[in-house]
Image (cartoon, rainbow, N blue to C red):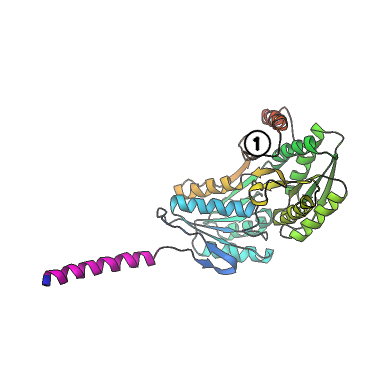
Amino acid sequence: MKKFYSMSLVLLLAISVILAGCGNKNQGAATENGGQAADGGEAAKSDIKIGMVTDVGGVNDKSFNQSAWEALEALQTETGAEVKYLQSKSDQDYDPNLNQFIKGGYNLTWGIGFNLANAIKKAADENPNSNLAIIDSVVDAPNVKSVTFAENEGSFLVGVVAGKMTKTNKVGFVGGQDSPLIKRFEIGFAAGVKAVNPNAQVVVNYTGAFDKPDLGKAAAATIYNNGADIIFHASGGTGTGVFNEAKSRVKSGQQVWVIGVDKDQSLEFGDDVTLTSMVKRVDEAVKKVSKDVVDGTFAPGTETLSLKDNGVGLPETNKNVPQDVLDVVEEYKQKIISGEVKVPAE
């Protein structure tokens, strides 16, 4: 009988340990101001902490903020590093959000988008021993990694698609904020269109925002009503409205297209309206720089990713673009990489 009770006690203790372990698994922790920690699951353990501050487009913008966060989630799964984001509802949130990570001892703090440049510079100057990084702007500080892209080159290629495939000889561009960065999208796109279709007209509309789908919908409606059948947008979350306008027109029998940006947006909005996308590998850049921190090889400085680096371009799959058009795209891609074709940026 004593032997039976001893075995029962051992079994009870074992069950208690298992249950305690299950109860302590990381399920993800919410942070202030809209922040959220990724669920580490069964990832390897690491004492590295990486924070990310979004611009006002938010982490679910289906564009560059979302790509950046998905990269950090993947990094956590692979390395066990702790990752969190803080969502900025206005530009007034940039400074406190960055400082929350810095004061919290994070090994790297990201600012996603050129609108955070001044805040990143201020934080870097005030905290010289902290590592920071930014997407889409160059911040001159010894503790900042700046990652930019040759958006004009990738936009040129989707301009080639639009120029070859428009049936009305009129295409559109919807931008977010009118800035040097978004101008690179517009100018590269127009150059690509004109390279293959000199008679095509490019209609441009800037909404002034990256987080206003209603403005994107109105801008798209104006351009489609003006006779365009293809719109390329570079407007973050505002672009959701461009897609919504196109979907409503397709449902009514009008054949119009949207060219997405940053990610393969056909995965989000469907092949019925997404002609192709200008993919900007924000995810790869964020993951690579963050992995350098995990590996202890973080190097501040500036890096520009172009067609040659596979930093920009079309998605691997383009269901709505005929092979003969893709062949022309590839020809121009190689000419840009070799330097034979110089794509304007301003």
Q: Nearer the viewer, residue 287 or 314?
A: 314
At 52% from the left edge and 54% from the top edge, which residue is drawn? 73
Quarter of the image where one finds residue 184? top right
Give coordinates of residue 148: x percent, y percent. Answer: 65, 45
Q: Main secondary structure of the magenta part?
A: helix
Give coordinates of residue 13: x percent, y percent. Answer: 25, 68
| Any part of residue 139 in sight | no
Is residue 17 magenta-colored?
yes
Quarter of the image where one finds residue 45? bottom left
Please, is residue 49 above or below residue 187 in the view? below
Tell me: 126 left or right of 227: left
Is residue 78 magenta-colored?
no
For label 1, the SS is loop
Give the quadrant of the N terminus: bottom left
| Any part of residue 295 in sight | yes
Residue labelled with disc 1: 307
Stretch in magenta: 3-27
Q: Nearer the viewer, residue 297 or 226?
A: 226
